[in-house]
């Protein structure tokens, strides 16, 4: 009976062990972003088993940022096969990039691991915390079976740029300090 209990303990421990889950996430460069600057937003995958094709939508705050372009990442093409990339539809009024998709072409295995799926370019419009959210995520393996995934929503911080008048006042203050310091230095000649 002791051996049976021990075997069940091992089985239960294996079932309770964490299983690596495929994730999608955002990485912005640079972060934070000053108002008026352009920046890139990477969509990355991690722990993907046999990824052959993907599709997703992204929502962002159109009052704080505006999308410019969607470029294919290197993840699927790194396997050496041909790909078919659809950049999707940008709607800066609604704050969406819809139906971004990519697939390997022809028979063969998918790609395992992690890497860059898509790179988006944005322009920072106003200061604030701009939320980023995935929706309609579909990941497929080489048998066209869906891969379970966890999309990790994110945010980008957009910072205000000091007004030119602030720089001018700061410069005047430094000049006044420097002039005052020169007057106080005794001349020993």
Image (spheres, rainbow, N blue to C red):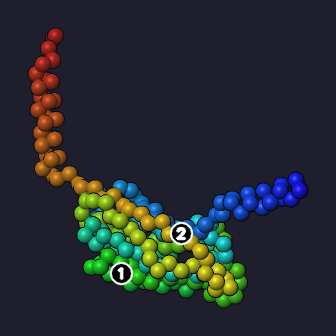
User: Quarter of the image holding residue 34?
Assistant: bottom left
Q: Residues within 10 Å of mark 2 (few under 14, many from 20)?
A: some
Q: Nearer the viewer, residue 160 or 142?
A: 142
Q: Nearer the viewer, residue 97 or 79?
A: 97
Q: Extreme bottom residue here?
A: 106
Q: Is residue 171 above or below residue 32?
A: above
Q: Position of residue 33 (x, y in %)?
A: 33, 58
Residue visible at 17% across and 46% down in the picture: 167
Q: Which residue is mark 2?
A: 150
Q: Position of residue 98 (x, y in %)?
A: 41, 82
Q: Position of residue 120 (x, y in %)?
A: 42, 72
Residue visible at 28% across and 72% down in the picture: 62
Q: Which residue is mark 1?
A: 90
Q: Extreme top residue here?
A: 188
Q: Could you give the CA–CA distance between mark 1 and mark 2, rounded to whole angstroms?
A: 23 Å
Q: Position of residue 60 (x, y in %)?
A: 34, 71
């Amino acid at each position: 009976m002791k051996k049976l209990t021990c075997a069940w303990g091992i089985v239960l421990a294996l079932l309770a062990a964490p299983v690596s889950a495929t994730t999608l996430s955002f990485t912005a460069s640079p972060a934070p972003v000053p108002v008026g600057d352009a920046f890139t937003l990477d969509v990355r995958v991690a722990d993907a088993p046999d990824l052959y094709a993907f599709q997703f939508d992204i929502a962002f705050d159109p009052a704080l940022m505006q999308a410019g372009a969607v470029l294919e990442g290197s993840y699927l093409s790194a396997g050496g096969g041909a790909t078919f990339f659809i950049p999707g539809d940008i709607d800066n009024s609604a704050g969406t990039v819809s139906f971004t998709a990519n697939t390997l072409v022809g028979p063969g295995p998918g790609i395992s691991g992690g890497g860059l799926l898509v790179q988006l370019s944005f322009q920072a419009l106003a200061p604030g915390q701009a939320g980023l959210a995935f929706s309609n995520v579909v990941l497929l393996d080489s048998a066209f079976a869906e891969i379970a995934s966890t999309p990790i929503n994110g945010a980008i911080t957009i910072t205000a740029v000091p007004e030119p008048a602030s720089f001018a006042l700061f410069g005047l203050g430094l000049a006044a300090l420097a002039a005052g310091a020169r007057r106080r230095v005794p001349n020993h000649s």
